[in-house]
Amino acid sequence: MEHWIAEIVSQLPIIVLFIIILFTLATLSKGADMLVDEAVTLSVRWGIPKVVIGATIVSLGTTLPEATVSVAAAIGGNPDIAMGNAIGSVVCDSSLIIGIASMIRPLPVHRETTDRQSWLQLGSGLLLVLVALPYSHLSDLFKIEGRIPQWIGFFFIALLITYLYLSFKRAKSGTLDTMDIEKETSEQDSAAMPYVIVKLVIGLALIIVSSKALLPTVEETAVRIGIPQSIIAATLVAFGTSLPELITAIQASRKGHGELAVGNVIGADILNILFVIGVASAVTPQGLVVPTYFYWFHIPFMLLILIVFKLFLTLGRPLIGRREGGVMFLLYLAYTVLGYILI
């Protein structure tokens, strides 16, 4: 789809490109509005905390771009793209997206629920490291590429199904602490459940399709006005597939549903590992190759950001404020700049 869009936008006048950018930004915002509103409605209707809704239903939808890109890359023989897309998205979600969302408005943290989900987030990252290591050549860790075998991919998919099932089961067995706070959603709650689900799906579709159209258009516009390709690669392409999570988190933060933004990021990280890498590994009989530079750059940075994010969720105030958001944002800048210099 991206190649088809790129071919079309390359032939359009620059004024039309600016119009397309404005239109896709508007549809992205509208889609995120619908997604956040209906996710909150589901949270209230089902008695499930917003952080769990964000970590499951919303994250499944917003990680679809990463899944499609990584699976296509794995099948096409580009494992570094498949791995880089998944790990880069984890880094982007937990640093850039949380950083921007929390600087717009501090994100409240429901400790009991978030603590459980964030341990799964960190555990998924550690599990990825364990299965990616080349155990027969650990002494040459930075010289020999690793490989995630196909059976690990199916194992990750099984873990994903288990995670989704247990998240809903555990959430339903508890009570929604914020039920009384959500009185303002009473008008939405009166809508029929099929209507709520349809609007949720439409919101997701608007976000994903608009993201697919926006990125090639912005890239073409940047080239036309003289921005170097290297700068484009280090910015737009680096977090392109995370745009759905970014827009959703910003809108959730603006509308006062910070728990949904935090849940979406936590769930997206878990799904980027179990869903994206799992499926990408499962569709390749030879397994997913892990290039050597992942061991000395991408994986250590991913673990650092996950650990810092976990500390912010566990220690101090029951929210991620602008100070914590600034730290996460700086970590993303360091990752981007160092990646551009070192790799």
Image: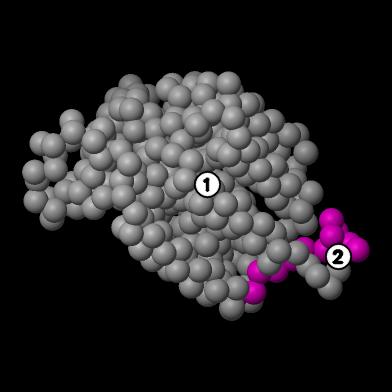
Residue 253 x/y as whole percent:
38, 29
Q: Is residue 171 magenta?
A: no
Per the image, label 1 sits on a secondary structure element best described as: helix
Residue, disc 2: 138
Residue 158 x/y as whole percent:
48, 72
- Quarter-of-image position of residue 327: top right
Pointer 1 or 2: first along the chain? 1
**Residue at the image position 73 percent from the left and 47 percent from the top:** 300
Per the image, label 2 sits on a secondary structure element best described as: helix
User: Nearest the camera: 305 or 89?
Assistant: 305
Residue 296 x/y as whole percent:
79, 49
Q: Which residues are magenta?
A: 139-150
Q: Is residue 208 left or right of residue 313?
A: left
User: Nearest the camera: 64 or 47?
Assistant: 47
- Check disc 2: other Cα within 10 Å, few if <14, some if 14-19, many if 20+: few
Mark sitting on residue 229: none
User: Nearest the camera: 198 or 22?
Assistant: 198
**Residue at the image position 39 percent from the left and 33 percent from the top:** 258
Q: Is residue 306 above or below residue 131?
A: above
Residue, disc 1: 115
Camera sees residue 263: yes
Q: Is residue 213 above or below residue 143?
A: above
Colouring of the image: one colour
